[in-house]
Image (tube, rainbow, N blue to C red):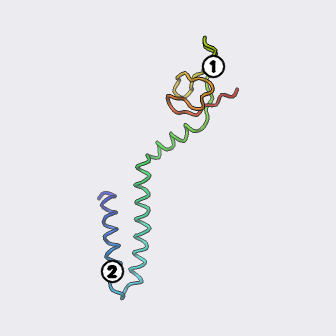
């Protein structure tokens, strides 16, 4: 069974529980509350999967931590350049991020 099918089943069970007789209404209410919590958790999981996997999120987070550049040097036009040590492309000073891989750059000495 897929998560989407489980979500459909839970929604269906929830609707049935809400409209049954008052005899066991308290127990049904507890089940309904539990189903609401489970449904919310499944929906959150589906949203996170759209965003990306845990590995993808960790990879993006690592890119936001500044990484030193290679040794800066001046080119023939008077511009300071350095190597992005993440993807090894040449970046111009004072770029805050590598335009090739998105790595945040630290230009301090």
In the rendered view, would you say 26 is above or below 100? below
Circle 1 crowding by C-alpha within 10 Å: few under 14, some 14–19, many from 20: some
In the rendered view, would you say 93 is above or below 55? above
C-alpha distance separating marks 2 and 1: 71 Å
Left/right of residue 79 with respect to residue 14 in the rendered view: right
Q: Nearer the viewer, residue 80 or 106?
A: 80
Location of residue 63 (image quadrant):
top right
| Residue that mark 2 sits on | 19
Q: Residue at x 33, y 74 (%)?
A: 15
Residue 25, percent across and down?
38, 84
Q: How many marks?
A: 2
Left/right of residue 22 with respect to residue 65 in the rendered view: left
Q: Determine the secondary structure under disc 1.
A: strand
Q: Nearer the viewer, residue 107 or 26?
A: 107
Q: Quadrant of the N terminus?
A: bottom left
Residue 104, percent across and down?
58, 34
CB under 8 Å between discs 2 and 1:
no
Q: Residue at x 59, y 28 (%)?
A: 95
Q: Residue at x 53, y 23 (%)?
A: 88
Q: Quadrant of the C terminus?
A: top right
| Residue that mark 1 sits on | 80
Residue 64, percent across and down?
57, 38
Q: Determine the secondary structure under disc 2.
A: loop
Circle 2 crowding by C-alpha within 10 Å: few under 14, some 14–19, many from 20: few
Please state which of the two labelled residues, at mark 2 or mark 1, is closer to the viewer.
Answer: 1
Question: Residue 67 has which mark?
Answer: none
Residue at the limit of the structure toward the top, as seen here = 76
Q: Residue at x 34, y 77 (%)?
A: 17
Residue at the limit of the structure toward the right, as seen here = 109
| Pointer 2 or 1: first along the chain | 2
């Amino acid at each position: 069974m897929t998560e989407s099918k489980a979500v459909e089943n839970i929604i269906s069970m929830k609707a049935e529980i809400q409209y049954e007789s008052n005899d066991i209404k308290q127990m049904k209410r507890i089940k309904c509350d539990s189903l609401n919590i489970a449904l919310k958790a499944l929906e959150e999981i589906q949203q996170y999967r759209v965003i990306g996997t845990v590995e993808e999120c960790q990879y993006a987070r690592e890119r936001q931590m500044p990484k030193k550049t290679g040794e800066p040097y001046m080119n023939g036009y008077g511009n300071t350049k350095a190597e992005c040590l993440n993807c090894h492309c040449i970046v111009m000073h004072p770029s805050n991020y590598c335009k090739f891989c998105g790595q945040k750059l630290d230009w301090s000495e």
